[in-house]
Image (cartoon, rainbow, N blue to C red):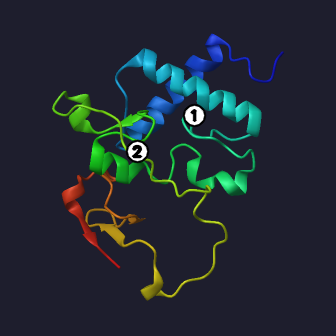
Amino acid sequence: MDEEKITDSELMEFYEQLKEDTEQGGYHLNPKEDFTLELVKGMLVNKKRYGYPACPCRLSSGKRDEDLDIICPCDYRDDDLNDYGQCYCGLYVSREVVEGLKDTGSIPERRPVGGESHKESKPVKVGDLSYPVWRCKVCGYLCANNNPPGVCPICKAKKERFERFM
């Protein structure tokens, strides 16, 4: 079998698992199922090709260490959802988009030119953190990102229940 050939059963199995994981994490897949299935198929092709589900809308180097920021869900998803109501490729959308309260459209690329932005992790002092750390006041979940997530992936508390921790 061709390494990039995706069967319907593989596609639907991966899609259903992704949908379940997404909803359990407090996120939402794009409700346009045909569009979403094409993106999921691209993720599966990348998974077979490279060994990891790189974002289907970005060029992958084929080297996991260089692509860590674009392995779906990518590092840019939460900021894109907060600012635009969808991630770069449109796979993930905000609750407002699902409920028809917000439209989607083109959004700018956040990935730095030249690829992955986390080339080599080095220990940092608390004052040198790249992102603020947010704490869920309900369960204590910590998230390092520009903004808190829309919903806590652990206890499902809303964004308003997060406080800046560091």
In the figure, is residue 126 to the left or right of 106? right
User: What residue type is disc 2 on?
Assistant: Gly
Task: Find numbered disc 2 in the image and state the secondary structure of the residue it sits on.
Answer: loop
Q: Considering only order in the chain, which callout, 1 or 2, is on the residue closer to the N terminus?
A: 2
Residue 25 is marked as 2
Query: Looking at the picture, does residue 32 appear above or below residue 103?
Result: above
Packing grade of label 1 (10 A; few <14, some 14-19, many >=20) is: many
Which residue in the protein does label 1 denote?
56
Position of the N terminus by quadrant: top right
Is residue 164 placed above or below 160 in the rendered structure? below
Tag 2 near tag 1, CB within 8 Å? no
Say the numbered circle drawn on residue 89: none
Instruction: Look at the image and tell me whether residue 163 can be seen.
Output: yes
Q: Quadrant of residue 56?
A: top right
Does the rendering let one see residue 153? no
Name the foreground residue: 163 vs 65.
65
- Give how far apart the Cα atoms at labels 2 and 1 are: 21 Å
Give the x, y percent position of residue 31.
34, 23
Residue at image coords 25%, 37%: 95
Q: Closer to the camera: disc 2 or disc 1?
A: 1
Q: Hey, which residue is sitting farthest left in the picture?
A: 101
